[in-house]
Amino acid sequence: MAHYKNSLTIKQWNEDDRPREKLIAKGKIALSDAELVAILIGSGNREHSAVGLSKKILLSINNNLNALGKLTVEDLTKFKGIGEAKAIAIITALELGRRRRLEEALEKPKITSSKSVFDVMQPIIGELQHEEFWIIYLNNANKIQLKMQMSKGGITGTIVDTRLVFKRAIELTATGIILCHNHPSGTLKPSTSDINLTKKIKNGGDILDIKILDHVIITENNYYSFADENIL
């Protein structure tokens, strides 16, 4: 009976097709996303090697790892060669990566730019399917005193009580605050209500001598900073 290279395990592939060996020899950075996923699934099917199957899966979600992390066991097992165990391995690995990013965000005590706001908040709200509005309270060294969810809404929007924003700021003796919310739609453009709310909170901050340093809109892969765009 003829043997199919593409149905063999990783150990039986040609050396150039062995992502495990490549990781050991060249380091994890040298591996493509497909090669990393191939290590997780271990083997492919008669039509595709594990790397080929991984490429097929990634191509179906436009090579977006965030999208891969959202696939269910049912979604993954639709691919020939992916059983429940392999699907669970992929889901587990992506979830561990997400949690690692969240822990890294929690460890960052200081805000130095709009990008650092994105790094802190994207793991928390960047992939939500509903809108949430958060406040980051800072001391005079721009170190985070508190990250606080002010409101949680549906897909279309959320409501923020500006009195509560400043009540907590006064309790913390915060000298600066950063407004932050997500757009589940993926659009980065601020809405009219986003702009009006920012102005309202900024006016309150001026009276209380609490600086509104920025308002950052977070999406899954990007952000929009009012301060960077000079509309704060």
Image (cartoon, grey):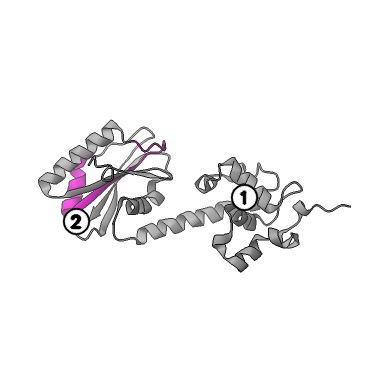
Residue in the picture at 25% in, 49% down = 178
**Residue 173, x across and y down, in percent:** 16, 56
Snapshot quadrant of residue 195: top left
- Give the residue at the far left of this rendering: 207
Q: Amino acid at mark 1?
A: Ala
- Give the residue at the far bottom of this rendering: 25
Residue in the picture at 27% in, 55% down = 146
Classify mark 2: helix, strand or loop: helix
Which of the numbered marks, if any, corresponds to residue 210? none
Q: How many numbered dots are placed on residues in this image?
A: 2
Range drawn in magenta = 161-189
To which residue does mark 1 refer?
87
Quarter holding the C terminus?
top left
Asked whether 165 falls inside the magenta stretch, the response is: yes
The answer to whether any part of residue 110 appears in the image is yes
Q: Is residue 110 depicted above or below 128 in this figure?
A: below
**Residue 79, x across and y down, in percent:** 67, 43
Q: Residues within 10 Å of mark 2 (few under 14, many from 20)?
A: some
Q: Is residue 174 left or right of residue 41?
A: left
Q: Amino acid at mark 2?
A: Leu
Tag 1 and tag 2, C-beta contact below 8 Å: no
Q: Is residue 38 left or right of residue 188?
A: right
